Image (spheres, grey):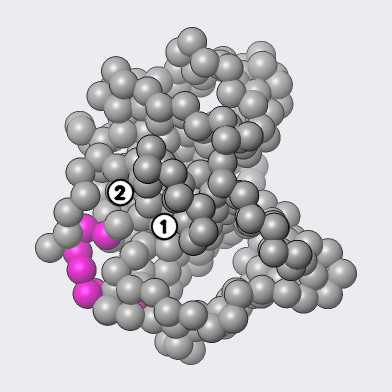
Amino acid sequence: MKTVLHKAADRGHADHGWLNAYHSFSFAGYYDPEKTHFGVLRVLNDDTVAPGKGFGQHPHDNMEIITIPLAGTLEHKDSMGNTGTISFGEVQVMSAGSGITHSEYNHSKSEPVSLLQIWIFPNIKNVKPRYDQIRYNLDKINNNWLQIVSPQADDEGTWVYQEAWFHIGRFSKESYSSYEIKKEGNGIYIFVISGSVEILDYTLSKRDALGLRDAKKVSFNFLADSLLLLMEVPMQIGAM
């Protein structure tokens, strides 16, 4: 098994006043040749957006963009005519495909919004752009890995054009859990949203991450009440 440890303090950071952003992988003005991607996982941004502020209309293509709010409410508009808001307990997927423009703003005029925005390379290029958002049952994440993203439209959660599975879980102190890989050859990237957990010989705290390659199963020992995002992704980049 091969591992890569990404400590929270070692992430890229940009404070734009209206946007406070931390980058787990090279992004915009932050570049680290050792952190360009983890398999098809290209971007993991930990963003806090000031009240009433946000990202104006901008383009994307051939990328699967997953947004997971952690606090507050995010407002979305895109060139397909989709409008709406998302908050904690929801996940949004946008398949940029052949090309799309969208904007994202903090819906509140008084409170910040914090979110994770994740980009993964698709396994099919130039598809018709699509948008989806779902609300998941917060009770089902208690001491459990709840699937929120998969490759199949008829599976639990929403779906993406990639052989990737995302799970979120909220675990109590001194509990244990495990995860078995769904597709041989995939890697696992674990991001600690809050809390503390032991994985192998590593102790991870808030916003730390650990990538695992050639693993079939991983076990977790929770040292504090914790909220984690687990992403299983292909390690080879390629699209038809």
Picture layout, residue 82 above or below residue 159? below
Picture layout, residue 50 above or below residue 57? above
In the rendered structure, does residue 126 fall within the stretch colored magenta?
yes
Q: State the residue at coordinates (36%, 69%).
A: 95
Q: Amino acid at mark 2?
A: Val
In the rendered structure, does residue 41 fall within the stretch colored magenta?
no
Give the farthest residue toward the right: 110
Q: Disc number at residue 40?
A: 2
Q: Circle 1 is placed at which residue position?
A: 119
Foreground residue among 156 and 28: 28
Give the farthest residue toward the top: 201
Note whether residue 60 is visible: yes
Note whether residue 227 is visible: no
Q: State the residue at coordinates (47%, 41%).
A: 167
The span shown in magenta is 122-130
Distance CA(mark 2)–CA(mark 1): 8 Å
